[in-house]
Image (cartoon, rainbow, N blue to C red):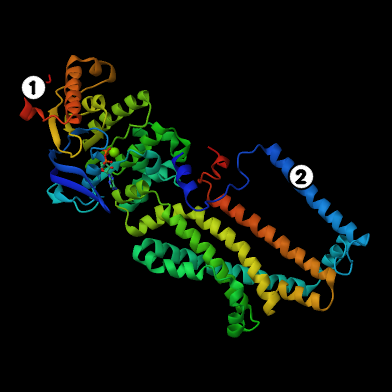
Amino acid sequence: MLDVRGLQKVYNGGARQVEAIRDLTFTLSAGELVCLVGPSGCGKTTLLKCIGGLLTPTSGEVLLQGRRVTGPPPGMAVVFQEYGRSLFPWLRVGENVELPLRQKGLPKARRRELVTEALAAVGLADAESAYPWQLSGGMQQRVAIARAVAFEPEVLLMDEPFAAVDAQTRADLEDLVRALWHKLGVTILFVTHDIDEAVYLGQRVLILSSSPTVVREELTIDLPDTRDQLHTRGDPRFTALRTHVQEQIQAAKRGLPSPSTAGDEEA
Amino acid sequence: MTLTERTSGGGPPAAPASGDGRPGRRRGATAWLGLAGLGTLLAVMEIVPRVGLVSPKYFPPTSRVAQALAGEVTDQAFWVALGDTLKGWALGLLIATVAGVVLGVLIAAVPVLREYTASTIEFLRPIPSVALIPLAVLLFGTDIRSTLLLVVYASFWQVLVQVLYGVQDVDPVADETARSYGLSALARVRYVLWPTALPYVMTGVRLAAAVALVLAITAELVIGAPGLGARIAVAQTSNAVPDMYALVTVTGLLGVLVNLGARAVERRTLAWHQSVRGEVAV
Ligand SMILES: Nc1ncnc2c1ncn2[C@@H]1O[C@H](COP(=O)(O)OP(=O)(O)O)[C@@H](O)[C@H]1O
Ligand SMILES: [Mg+2]
């Protein structure tokens, strides 16, 4: 479904060169929910922008259903971390959700239907005629999610979408993402720097090293498919997995080699 | 929040149109204070010539000016002159706004064009419009087109510069969002760039409207193109001093109305913008 092959991105800011991503290779199959976790500044946003066709990689390639991504692909939606700036303040909530559909050329009746459904799905049915800036942060991010959902994408990219909301809202939004994923069968790549969030949400977790960035480990999350905040987080398996991810990230920060070469001495 | 931080850095965005959060009672008090000040000024201008501090010949008392004003408004020719002035002003402003917006967006959208035009703009912009009076006379004589040339030249830069500021204020995240949802370049101009630039455009038009009025009157006064300015010149040469003041007062009132009108339009179109947000019903 989504193939990232040998991806490298070097920013050329005049004299200063920043190698944001060294060499990333991974695959997402259709309908998967994969979390990507890595320390701040390791190039997660850069990676998502390359996948979303917003940035051209320095080398390597991104394939969506076998086709090389060169610009924003039609079946893809991105939810950005900066929800406040990603929603258009001059459009009402409903219009924000509708705009991409208009661009898709859908008839008005269908657009209305999708907008209403998407807003209801994120629990904001009555906020349609409000302006985004009249809503709280968590509500704004839900609008951004509704906009992505209404777009009916095959692949949904989410860039630390809940980094700026409070813990309770965050837990609700995590459950919302899982629920929507179940309902829509969409392929989701969810980027986060939060280890608990990655383990709680994902079927798989890709752990990135710190810069220069490579995939340090791919971990399958063998927790039951139905997850809830109370029990899943209390599950000993959950604790074991998150400890493992945490160790990997700590080791990455200290620049230790990954487990494939170093064995298990950290565990 | 973020929006405030961003816009405060750029050029002057839409200034808060009296909606700066001050409670209504304070605002009412300020308005009364302002009216009282104006009343005092008028009273002083009535008394000073009467007690002989200045010659009533050149500074007629307020009541004389008011009388002359009453005379003017019953004169058909006054309304024709007012119409000419307004025509030159409105038409010039319209041309300048359309040209400023179209060129501004074009220049901003094509980076090569921006560098290509930057020094030309920096060179042409500071030329005072009035320096073009000889050219206007050469081209159009005392025709209303003389007024138009000056008005358009002066107001065009006001609009263009604001549009250039506004276009630079486009949020990269908003633009990336639009691109990721497949919005074409044209759609992004319409749905992202234009709404972002609109507060700046409004500010530009408001400034341009004031400048346009100055230049319209100047052209009429100096060149003799038809309008209030020409009528002021005639009043002066025929020694109708109170009429001259009455006409000057009218131009002042026009200026006030133009500013109030521009702010009202600004408030209506920018209901979503942070400078007017407080007034939108949730
Ligand atoms: N437009 C840019 N130009 C130059 N360097 C950049 C740019 N965007 C990001 N970087 C650099 O690339 C690295 C990775 O950034 P980013 O992808 O935002 O990381 P993350 O999302 O994981 O926090 C950082 O060192 C950052 O400074
Ligand atoms: Mg980031």
Secondary structure state at the residue bearing disc 1: loop
Q: Is residue B127 above or below residue A158?
A: below
Q: Amino acid at mark 2?
A: Leu
- Is there CB contact under 8 Å for labels 2 and 1? no
Front residue of this view, candidates B271 and B135: B135
Q: Measured from the top left, where is residue A234 in percent x and y? A: 24, 15
Mark 1 Cβ and ligand 1 under 8 Å apart = no
Q: Amino acid at mark 1?
A: Asp
Front residue of this view, candidates B154 and B74: B154
Q: Chain of mark 1?
A: A
> Residue A17 — which label?
none
Front residue of this view, candidates B142 and B76: B142
> Residue B33 — which label?
2
User: Label 1, on which residue?
Assistant: A264
Q: Measured from the top left, where is residue B147 in percent x and y? A: 62, 75
* 2 or 1: mark nearer the eye: 1
Say which residue appears at 50% left-offset and 71% top-offset. B124
Secondary structure state at the residue bearing disc 2: helix
